[in-house]
Image (cartoon, rainbow, N blue to C red):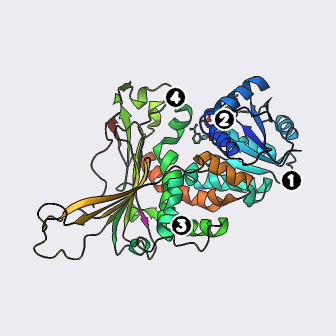
Amino acid sequence: MTDQSLIILGASGDLTARLLLPGLGALLAAGHVPGLQLIGAATEDWDDARWRSRVSDSFGFSWDKTRYIQADVTKADDLRAVLAAADGPPAIFFALPPAVTARACSVLLDVDLPPGTRLVLEKPFGTSSQAAAELNSLLTRLVPEKQIHRVDHFLGKSTVLNILGLRFANRIFEPLLTSTHVASVDIVFDEDLALENRAGYYDHAGALADMIQSHLLQILGLLTMEPPTSLDAGELRDRLADVLRATHIWEGNPAAFSRRARYTAGSLQGRQLPGYAQEPGVDPSRNTETLAEVVLAVDTWRWAGVPFRLRSGKAIGDSRKEAVITFRCPPRVPDGLTGYDEHDRLRIGFGPDKLALDFNINGPGDPFVLDQVTLEAGFGPGDLPPYGEVLRGVFDNDPTLSIRADVAEQCWRIVEPVTAAWADGKVPLLEYPAGSTGLTDSLLKP
Ligand code: NDP
């Protein structure tokens, strides 16, 4: 009898190979869940040996307690066979295309789930607030909410979690994080990755759903929520839900406060890339954006009036991943002290992971001319990669780092006016060359 079982549905897929197995390997190597039994399932006609070799390549060591089962997860008998192979209380990880996940969940209604079964769902969680609500109600017919883990692996990133320590374990930053002192906040995740053969998923998602609706809204939530009294699942997710409920598109005007664009052919780090519309598997008529930008308002006492710009683009030459808090000007700079032209900024880098504070001092040279200097601190990497953290929460039955049902619905509610304005053609689809900095000007001048 082993401690626990992890069933990966979609064992032959990209997520499993690139992120899930390496994260699991790191968790096991660190001594967690030593007795774990791992079951991989997919429709591919693989045998145990082929699966084991994928597992050991990813782990960097061999793991005997694993086997592969060929199964179509849309068939109840196949799902029963997979579950019957589990020795311990299973965590079922749905590493499947979203539509197949929804189908598999409805089929599970006809299958007896062992006590203690946990369901682990990937993003995108639904396609709209209504679809997310329907999926939520289906899932709670299978297991209680506390056994449902909706993955946002950004919540497993140590730098993202560092926002909590930075804000709530220091006296010096938190009192300044209010509309009295902050002029604007930018949350940017520009990647140098292009489509990388993921048209099947990405062409139906786009940058808004792939990055902003999920990861960047979680970062916004951590940056803006009121201090939790503890980091347990109830308290932290209550505070996150409060602030996301108060978040909406700036001035309620998605046509004016959102932008979308897709990359054209260009050169990225010495690689010649085709335009997005020419990438294999892309349907250009879907008008999928590879860059999305929105301005949001967080309508709370603390944040009312501060614009939050969220932006993410693919195939960007100057990859930039950071949250930047721009402070207001000081009320007055004394006469005789010249050269003030830069706001103070607190920058939280999500790769490289670092914290930087840009501020003005008299600096070198003429002591009455201001210079901007930067104080920088690097965060080392976390003990575990993000998927290792996510899986640790699953095995520990701790949903703190997973997205609660209402939060998943709120995140769709926030972006839905933007999706509707884009579908109505109210916002043009702009273009930028791959390898460029994307759209250069800003939607909102500071
Ligand atoms: P892939 O298309 O690469 O893999 C899908 C997997 O599902 C394959 O193993 C496929 O196996 C299996 N599958 C499909 N239909 C069935 C079926 N009826 N029965 C059993 N298995 C089936 O997708 P990804 O791995 O890229 O994505 C999986 C999920 O993870 C998606 O929700 C995606 O949004 C999410 N995600 C992915 C990321 C990534 O980087 N890849 C990042 C973040 C989230 P077979 O072909 O053998 O049927």
Q: Quadrant of residue 58?
A: top right
How packed mark 4 is, by other alpha carbons closer than 10 Å (few <14, some 14-19, many 20 or more), is few
Question: Residue 297 lies in magenta, yes or no?
Answer: yes
Q: Nearer the viewer, residue 104 or 360?
A: 360
Disc number placed over residue 115 in the picture, else none: 1
Tell which tag, 4 or 2, sits nearer the viewer: 2
Relative image position of residue 286 (x, y in whole percent): 47, 36
Disc number placed over residue 35 in the picture, else none: none
Q: Nearer the viewer, residue 109 or 269?
A: 269
Where is mark 2, residue-wise?
59
Where is mark 4, residue-wise?
197
Bounds of the magenta segment: 294-298
Tell which tag, 3 or 4, sits nearer the viewer: 4
The answer to whether residue 77 of the structure is visible from this angle is yes
Disc 2 on helix, strand or loop? Answer: helix
Tell which tag, 3 or 2, sits nearer the viewer: 2
Q: Please state if 422 lies on the left or on the right of 333 as rendered.
A: right
Q: Residue at x 63, y 62 (%)?
A: 406
Disc number placed over residue 245 in the picture, else none: 3
Helix, strand or loop for the magenta stretch, by majority: strand
How packed mark 3 is, by other alpha carbons closer than 10 Å (few <14, some 14-19, many 20 or more), is some
Q: Quadrant of residue 64?
A: top right
